Image: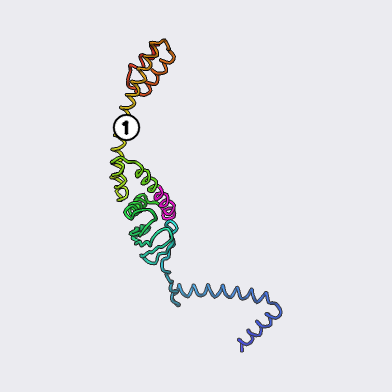
């Protein structure tokens, strides 16, 4: 009987004052929530079971997008072949295979990816950096192909095999040899300029002689003779 009275009262309030009913409903909901929390703390009611969603993470490499479920990750895209990766530990993502990047041998791709990991490049920035590195590789390979000397050809072969350290050593060898040759040529050119200075001085063309002495001193700065002759004019 009391329940019927309460229902009639609520219906009457709903007709005469809808706003009051909404206010009472809100207050009742709050009261019910507080009561529910207290019953859980007193272990009268069981705690609700929290569902843990499966880990999901979107990433990109170049123009590649993909997702991760658990510890396995697969990626595919237009500019890259299929990529498979394994996620080991917190934040430690190891790229294991990439089928191809246009214009790059697979060995080179592997080395570039290893470099990105060693330098701890953020995943969000790997796409742009990988494209940049691929472009640098292609430009370097093209320049080495244009050079016809034996050392450059060996460096290019090492580069295409992904052996960047060997390519670097070969190019250092080439640099040392070319610097030696350049120094010899500079010394020879300095001798030419010095002889021209002497010829100009014999003809009393002192300003021209001074210019040649200066040129000789610039080409061979370690030769004090050229500097002394400049001071004598």
Whether 48 is drawn above or below 168: the answer is: below
- Is residue 83 one of those drawn in magenta? no
The image quadrant where one finds the C terminus is: top left
Which residue corresponds to the image point at 33% horizontal and 30% vertical from the top-left? 182
Which residue corresponds to the image point at 43% horizontal and 16% vertical from the top-left? 208
- Mark 1, residue position: 179
Which residue corresponds to the image point at 30% horizontal and 37% vertical from the top-left? 174
Per the rendered image, the range of residues in magenta is 122-135
- Is residue 131 one of those drawn in magenta? yes
Residue occupying the far right of the picture: 16
Whether 29 is drawn above or below 146: the answer is: below
Q: In this view, does 1 lie to the left or right of 168?
A: right
175 and 39: which one is in front?
175
Q: Position of residue 139 (x, y in %)?
A: 39, 46
30 and 57: which one is in front?
57
Q: Where is residue 103 in the image (x, y as percent from the top left)?
A: 38, 53
Which residue corresponds to the image point at 38% horizontal and 64% vertical from the top-left? 74
233 and 1: which one is in front?
233
Q: Where is residue 46 in the image (x, y as percent from the top left)?
A: 43, 76
Main secondary structure found in the magenta portion: helix
SS for tag 1? helix
Q: In this view, does 33 lie to the left or right of 87?
A: right
């Amino acid at each position: 009987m009391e329940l019927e009275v309460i229902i009639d009262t609520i219906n009457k309030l709903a007709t005469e004052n809808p706003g009051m009913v909404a206010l009472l409903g809100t207050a009742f909901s709050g009261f019910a929530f507080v009561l529910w929390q207290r019953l859980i703390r007193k272990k009268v009611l069981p705690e609700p079971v929290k569902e843990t969603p499966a880990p999901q993470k979107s990433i990109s490499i170049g123009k590649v997008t993909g997702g991760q479920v658990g510890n396995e990750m697969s990626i595919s895209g237009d500019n890259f072949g299929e990529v498979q990766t394994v996620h080991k530990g917190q934040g430690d993502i190891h790229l294991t295979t990439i089928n191809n990047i246009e214009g790059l041998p697979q060995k080179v791709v592997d080395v570039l990816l290893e470099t990105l990991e060693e330098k701890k490049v953020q995943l969000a920035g790997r796409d742009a950096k990988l494209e940049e590195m691929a472009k640098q590789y292609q430009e370097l390979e093209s320049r080495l192909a244009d050079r016809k000397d034996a050392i450059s050809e060996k460096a290019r072969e090492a580069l295409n095999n992904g052996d960047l350290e060997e390519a670097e050593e070969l190019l250092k060898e080439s640099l040392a040899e070319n610097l030696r040759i350049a120094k010899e040529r500079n010394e020879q050119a300095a001798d030419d300029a010095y002889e021209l200075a002497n010829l100009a001085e014999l003809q009393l063309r002192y300003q021209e002689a001074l210019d040649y002495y200066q040129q000789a001193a610039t080409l061979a700065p370690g030769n004090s003779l050229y500097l002394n002759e400049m001071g004598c004019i």
